[in-house]
Structure formats: structure tokens, C-alpha cells
Amino acid sequence: MASRRSVLLLSLGALFLAATAFTTRSTVLAQDLVRLASGSVVSLRTPEFVQPGKRYAFTWAGGGPAQTYVVKTKREDGWVLVEVADENTNPIYFVPGDLPTRWLNVGTAISIQEMRPHQ
């Protein structure tokens, strides 16, 4: 009889511990849940003077020297498609006229200066 009582108490204790562990775990998971607030997208218009086919020196807020890019395509929401910066490429590794491109958001630039064409 005493052994049945011990087994029953141990079983109840194990069930209590298991229930407590699962309840605590789900509470922690609920606290770790991140919800994103709904909002709107903000975009700055591309400056009118930025034109496809021209070279510009862009200075970014992060610091460092200006980077020069040739603008290939212009969108009105601040994004421009550019050939990779002249300072970052060695033209001997590319087929002429086939430089890599990337999209830049000119709204984040702190300075944009038009450069002379290559001679």
C-alpha cells in the first residue's frame, strides 16, 4: 500500500513539474514574439538633375571618400541603376561596356556632384 502511495505521489509530482515546465515555456515564447507595426513606405524623389548616362560623385552619410558612378537608369522614387564605382573596379578585368551594375538610393546621399566625362 505504501509503495502504491509513493508511486502515485511521484507520478502526480512528475505531472505537476511537466505542466509547470510547459506553461512556463509557452509564456516565455509569448513574450519573445515580435509584432511589426503597420506603416507606410517613405521614399525621397530622385533629384531632377541626376540624368542617365552622366557620371556623379556620391558622398554617403557613413563617411569615407566620394564614390563615382555612371547612372544607367533612373527611377522617380530615389533609386538609380549605376555601373559599379570607378574606384572599386579595374577595367582590365571586364569586357568594355559590360561593367557590373547595382541599384543605389540617392536619397541617402549627403552630396551628389556631377563629374566631367572621361576623356
Image (spheres, rainbow, N blue to C red):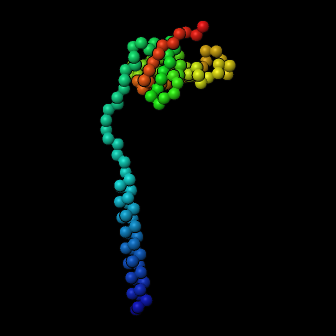
Q: Residue at x 32, y 41 (%)?
A: 37
Pick the quarter of the image with the N terminus. Answer: bottom left
Q: Residue 12: give x, y in percent of width and height.
A: 38, 78
Question: Residue most toward the right?
Answer: 92
Question: Residue most toward the bottom?
Answer: 1
Q: Residue at x 67, y 22 (%)?
A: 93
Q: Identify which residue, 1 or 28, lies in the foreground.
A: 28
Quadrant of the rendered image containing residue 15: bottom left
- Picture layout, residue 29 above or below residue 112: below
The reply, left or right, for residue 50 in relation to residue 38 is: right
Q: Residue at x 61, y 23 (%)?
A: 89
Quadrant of the rendered image containing residue 117: top right
Report whether residue 42 is seen: yes
Q: Residue 116: give x, y in percent of width and height.
A: 53, 10
Q: Residue 88: give x, y in percent of width and height.
A: 59, 24
Question: Residue most toward the front?
Answer: 64
Q: Identify which residue, 86 or 10, lies in the foreground.
A: 86
Report whether residue 52 is seen: no
| Count of marks overlaid on the render | 0
The reply, left or right, for residue 10 in relation to residue 98 is: left
Q: Identify which residue, 28 or 56, lies in the foreground.
A: 56
- Picture layout, residue 31 above or below residue 69: below
Pick the quarter of the image with the C terminus. Answer: top right
Q: Residue at x 42, y 19 (%)?
A: 75
The reply, left or right, for residue 81 in relation to residue 40 is: right
